[in-house]
Image (spheres, helix red, strand yellow):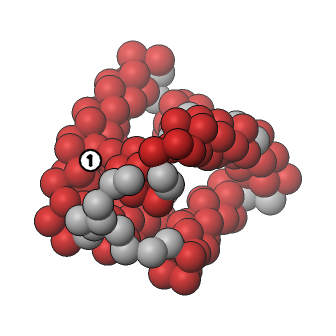
């Protein structure tokens, strides 16, 4: 989501104040998304909640990139933030249930920081693709990453809802 202010300024001519407002709304969407994700994960399970939010992220990124009306972008930005960042609400529970107590803190730190390290290249990669090819190709790449996430979740992540922690 770090690409959004630059996108709003370059593609739509928004100034710093306007892009800051849209970024704020997206962050509010993220906050709501984290809460909604946690509620869903506890009710329907971790795996289905992740798949739902990953699909929502893929769709909302593509949808958002097509918008030009400022008011629509404001509301869509909240949804974008909800789906793209809302999954943060489930990582702790998922990792806690997947690892025994003796390894839990290490697993949390290693997995979160590997994700941060790899994810740190995202803005550079998306920016390079947008500069060399097009913004729409860069957005399509982002959406395809969520599709890959869905496939990985289906085949690699066990459902652990209600598992007793050891």
Q: Which residue appears farthest toward the top when viewing the image?
A: 17
Q: Nearer the viewer, residue 38 or 56?
A: 38
- Residue 97 point in image, percent of width and height: 39, 57
Q: Residue at x 52, y 36 (%)?
A: 105
Give the x, y percent position of residue 137. 68, 64
Residue 97 showing in the rendered view: yes
- Left or right: residue 32 versus residue 66 is left
* Residue occupied by mark 1: 33
Secondary structure of the residue carrying tag 1 is helix
Give 116 or 16, whichever is nearer the viewer.
116
Image position, residue 55 (x, y; %): 40, 71
Note whether residue 84 is visible: no
Between 32 and 58, the one lying in front of the other is 32
- Tally the numbered discs: 1
Please tell me which residue lies in front, 97 or 87.
97
State whether residue 23 is above or below residue 130. Answer: above
- Residue at 48% x, 52% y is 100
In the figure, 13 relative to 76: above or below?
A: above
Horizontal side, residue 118 vs residue 165: left or right: right
Please rate how many residues cluster around mark 1, counting C-alpha atoms within 10 Å: few if below 14, some from 14 to 19, many from 20: many
Q: Residue at x 23, y 65 (%)?
A: 162
**108 sits left or right of 35 in the view:** right
The vertical placement of 161 against 70, above or below, is below
Residue 71: image quadrant is top left
């Amino acid at each position: 989501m770090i690409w959004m202010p630059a996108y709003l300024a370059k593609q739509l001519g928004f100034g710093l104040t306007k892009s800051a407002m849209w970024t704020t709304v997206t962050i509010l969407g993220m906050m709501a998304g984290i809460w909604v994700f946690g509620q869903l994960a506890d009710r329907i399970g971790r795996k289905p909640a992740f798949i739902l939010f990953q699909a929502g992220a893929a769709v909302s990124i593509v949808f958002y990139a097509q918008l030009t009306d400022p008011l629509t972008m404001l509301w869509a930005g909240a949804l974008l933030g909800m789906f793209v960042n809302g999954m943060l609400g489930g990582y702790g529970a998922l990792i806690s249930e997947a690892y025994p107590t003796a390894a839990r803190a290490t697993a949390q730190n290693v997995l979160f920081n590997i994700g941060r390290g790899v994810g740190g290249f995202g803005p550079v990669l998306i920016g390079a693709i947008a500069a060399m090819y097009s913004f729409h190709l860069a957005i399509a790449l982002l959406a395809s990453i969520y599709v890959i996430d869905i496939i990985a979740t289906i085949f690699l992540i066990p459902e652990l809802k209600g598992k007793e922690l050891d």
